Amino acid sequence: MRRSTIATILAGVAVGFAFAGTAWAEARSEMGKQEYESNCVACHGTGGKGDGYFAQYLKLPIPDLSTIQQRNNGVFPSDRMVEIIDGRTALKGHGPRNMPIWGTTYTEKAANYYRGTAYDSEQFVRVRVLALTDYLYSLQVRK
């Protein structure tokens, strides 16, 4: 009898963690979508195709973000995307930096967001860059 009670409790805890994980994934996805819509849509467009309303004013073509995985032999290069989005570290082979350096922008936003309190600006930056990277993954063309 006691064993079944413990098993029931553990099963309930596991289900609770599963729902919490799902809720966190949804919140992260929503944050990524919000970051994308406020910072990327103007150039990359709503679907990431490079057809945003501001693209017509730029000299260089805007990359299609929906085919990143396709262009990398079916693997989404998350670490590389994090580095590109953050932008504070120069990347070999990336060429000239033609998009904003979001790591610097997010660091400035952190200072305003946490004004008057102790905070870790790197954590603020990392959460947003990872959420945005996760959202880019969701835009990938699936075959």
Image: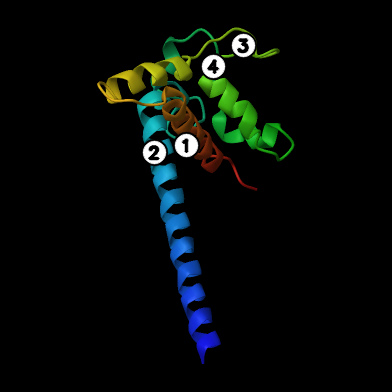
Q: Residue at x 39, y 38 (%)?
A: 31
Whether residue 17 is visible here, answered yes or no, is: yes
Q: Which residue is disc 4 drawn over?
A: 87
Q: Quick one: label 3, few (<14), some, or many (20+) residues within 10 Å? A: few
**What is the distance, in whole Å, between disc 4 and disc 1 at their CAs?**
15 Å
- Mark 3 or mark 1: whose residue is earlier in sequence: 3
**What is the distance, in whole Å, between disc 3 and disc 1 at their CAs?**
21 Å
SS for callout 4: loop
- Mark 2 or mark 1: whose residue is earlier in sequence: 2
Q: Residue at x 52, y 23 (%)?
A: 85
**Residue 33: x percent and y percent?**
41, 37
Whether residue 63 is visible here, answered yes or no, is: no
Instruction: Name the mark on residue 131.
Output: 1
**Residue 108: x percent and y percent?**
36, 16
Q: Residue furthest left?
A: 116
Mark 4 touches mark 3? (CB < 8 Å): no
Is 57 rendered above or below residue 32? above
Q: Quick one: label 4, few (<14), some, or many (20+) residues within 10 Å? A: some
**Residue 140: x percent and y percent?**
57, 40
Is 16 rendered above or below residue 85? below
Q: Residue at x 71, y 33 (%)?
A: 72
Q: Quick one: label 1, few (<14), some, or many (20+) residues within 10 Å? A: many
Instruction: Name the mark on residue 31.
Output: 2
Q: Residue at x 28, y 20 (%)?
A: 112
Q: Which residue is disc 3 drawn over?
A: 90
Instruction: Name the mark on residue 71.
Output: none
- Mark 2 or mark 4: whose residue is earlier in sequence: 2
- Of the residues shown, which amino acid type is indicated by label 1? Ala
SS for callout 2: helix
